Amino acid sequence: MKKGRLKLVSVILALVVLVQPFSRMAVFISFKINQDYISRVLCENRYKPELSCHGQCVLMKKIKKLEEKEHNQDMQIIKQLNELIYTQMTFDWSPAPLIIQTTDIRQYITDTPHVSSAYALSLFKPPRIS
């Protein structure tokens, strides 16, 4: 389930990255197609021909609105990604092993059977120098 959420966030981030350049292009193409209508009806400077606006003010407002929207979406995605990262970090605490300390040498417990050092010395002899 956690991998599914991570894949979902990855797909959303990829779409946001890929859609942003196309959305600006779509706004510009829409402006160019409707520029005559925008300059005659929607332009704030339509009664001031000396400014030669031709609807550029409307285009700038749309681009600014689009940038604000993209910024807000990016911030929401970053917030969701941070939440996902923090929820993924889980800790597995296990209790420490019980350690028994004794003062008497004879009470040491070992996993390997006790081997006498005399037996080890009888097997391993240093080489002779002739």
Image (tube, rainbow, N blue to C red):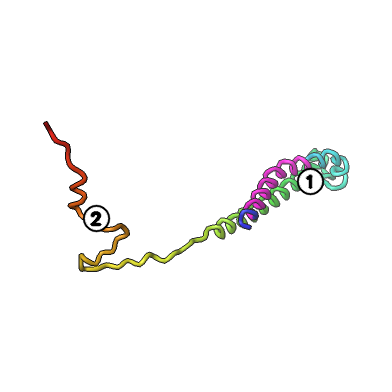
Compared with 1, 21 (above or below) is: above
Residue type, mark 1 in image = Val
Q: Residue 56: x, y in percent? A: 78, 41
Front residue of 93 and 34:
93
Q: Are marks 2 and 1 in contact (CB under 8 Å)?
A: no
Q: Residue 65: x, y in percent? A: 73, 50
Q: Which residue sits at x=74%, y=42%?
A: 24
Tell me where the magenta segment starts and ends, as one range: 5-27
Q: Is residue 73 left or right of residue 112?
A: right
Q: Residues within 10 Å of mark 2 (few under 14, many from 20)?
A: few
* Residue found farthest to the top: 130
Q: Is residue 15 magenta?
A: yes
Residue 46 is drawn in which quadrant? top right
Mark earlier in primary sequence (2, 1): 1
Front residue of 10 and 55:
10
Q: Residue 128: x, y in percent? A: 14, 35
Mark number, residue 77:
none
Residue type, mark 2 in image = Val
Q: Which residue is mark 1?
A: 58
Q: Is residue 11 left or right of residue 110?
A: right
Closer mark to the observer between disc 2 and disc 1: 2
Q: Quadrant of the N terminus?
A: bottom right
Majority SS type along the magenta span = helix
Q: Is residue 74 left or right of residue 103?
A: right
Q: Which residue sits at x=69%, y=51%?
A: 68
Residue 59 is drawn in which quadrant? top right
Q: Which residue is mark 2?
A: 115
Q: Which residue sits at x=45%, y=64%?
A: 93
Front residue of 84 and 35:
84
Q: Residue 89: x, y in percent? A: 52, 58
Cα separation between marks 2 and 1: 92 Å
